């Protein structure tokens, strides 16, 4: 593979403006141009950097996802056409870790209620026994990759005890006990916060359903920064309504944007955020660093960074 020109698809604008990335890549000696997915705009490009998938990308040699998740892309078609797919895993741990720490502190210290009251200019204190502190409480982090690592570091920093779930039971620093997926219900049983940080695959679709929610403590919160499809959303709404769990913080949903009529918008102890847990002004710089390294590796005849297909 030889990369002379990389297209930056305009869909990246949902996360950062494409221009600074184009300038940064140009400074790294690879021609970069902003494209709109049309075959004309992609002429002379061998590769594209993108948020969304477009059919025209199947004529290229290499597609780079600015996200860690690659569930938007038709993997079988990529294999058939011999298109290399890479992702941006590895750059989100700090931002998502801090977002999760923010959710945890907001829910325990009732900050989400203050923000809601401020909107109504209402001086309203929480009940004497509503607030609590998280030190010594347990969190269960499901998925111990780049995201999981960033989350574990923040939660242990807050004095929490952390258990984790992943495919292999290998130990992980800062994690008291690592369960495999078979032990998921046992892993979530003592946790005050269950945090989801796995990719959406056939194996993780609706990993959290009615039975897993029932296995959680009644005073537990579910935090989903993975993908909406990892949770059976109907079962979640029911569990929240019936008080089977206390609440949650949800950054991702089965349908995005979250439809206006979703009951999740109006639940007192549910924080809704618009799939932005990883947003940071440095996002494009992190993506640029991956791309620069990949371009170097490809020139040396090696695989690009974070090759998925
Ligand atoms: P990663 O590849 O570094 O880590 C994924 C982890 O999940 C690994 O530990 C892996 O072993 C584990 N895993 C995979 N399949 C599993 C299964 N079937 N059961 C249990 N564990 C399993 O990826 P990452 O960078 O940590 O990102 C994880 C996912 O989080 C992404 O795929 C993406 O969907 C999502 N994400 C969301 C945001 C956001 O803005 N909300 C940002 C980044 C990533």
Image: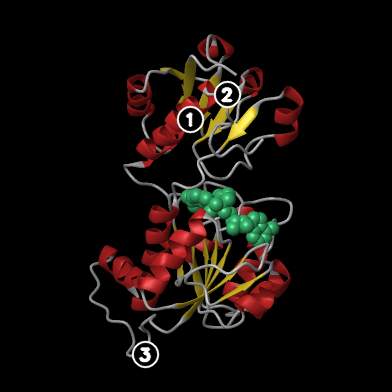
Estimate the x, y position of residue 130 in percent, counting from the top left.
Answer: 38, 85
Please tell me which residue is depicted at 42% across the width and 63% down the height of the picture. Answer: 100
Number of the front mark, 3 or 1: 1
Mark 2–mark 3 distance (CA, rounded to whole Å): 62 Å
Indicate the quadrant where residue 58 lies: top right
Q: Is residue 164 visible?
A: yes
Indicate the quadrant where residue 134 lies: bottom left
Number of the front mark, 2 or 3: 2
Q: Nearer the viewer, residue 97 or 84?
A: 84
Estimate the x, y position of residue 257 in percent, counting from the top left.
Answer: 52, 46
Q: Earlier in the sequence, mark 2 or mark 3?
A: 3
Residue linked to disc 1: 11
Q: Nearer the viewer, residue 255 or 165?
A: 165
Residue linked to disc 2: 301
State the scheme by which the image is colored: secondary structure
Tag on residue 91? none
Residue linked to disc 3: 129
Estimate the x, y position of residue 116 in percent, counting from the top left.
Answer: 33, 67
Q: In the shown orientation, is residue 246 left or right of residue 104? A: right
């Amino acid at each position: 593979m030889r990369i002379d020109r990389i297209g930056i698809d305009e869909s990246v604008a949902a996360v950062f403006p494409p221009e600074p990335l184009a300038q940064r890549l140009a400074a790294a000696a690879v021609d970069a141009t902003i494209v709109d997915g049309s075959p004309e705009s992609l002429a002379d490009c061998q590769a594209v950097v993108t948020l969304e998938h477009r059919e025209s990308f199947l004529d290229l040699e290499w597609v780079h996802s600015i996200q860690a998740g690659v569930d938007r892309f038709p993997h079988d078609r990529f294999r058939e056409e011999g298109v290399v797919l890479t992702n941006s895993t590895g750059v989100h741990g700090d931002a998502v870790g801090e977002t999760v720490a923010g959710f945890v502190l907001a829910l325990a210290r009732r900050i989400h209620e203050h923000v809601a009251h401020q909107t109504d200019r209402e001086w309203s204190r929480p009940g004497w026994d509503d607030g609590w502190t998280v030190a010594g409480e347990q969190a269960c982090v499901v998925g111990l990759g780049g995201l999981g690592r960033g989350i574990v570091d923040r939660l242990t920093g807050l004095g929490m005890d952390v258990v984790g779930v992943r495919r292999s039971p290998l130990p992980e620093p800062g994690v008291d006990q690592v369960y495999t997926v078979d032990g998921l219900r046992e892993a979530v049983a003592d946790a005050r916060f269950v945090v989801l940080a796995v990719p959406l695959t056939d194996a993780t679709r609706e990993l959290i359903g009615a039975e897993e929610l029932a296995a959680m403590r009644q005073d537990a919160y579910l935090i989903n920064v993975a993908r909406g499809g990892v949770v059976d959303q109907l079962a979640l709404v029911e569990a929240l309504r019936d008080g089977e769990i206390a609440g949650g913080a949800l950054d991702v949903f089965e349908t995005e944007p979250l439809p206006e009529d979703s009951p999740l918008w109006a639940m007192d102890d549910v924080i809704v955020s618009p799939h932005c847990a990883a947003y940071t002004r440095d996002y494009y710089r992190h993506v640029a660093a991956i791309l620069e390294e990949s371009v170097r590796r490809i020139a040396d005849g090696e695989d690009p960074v974070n090759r998925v297909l």
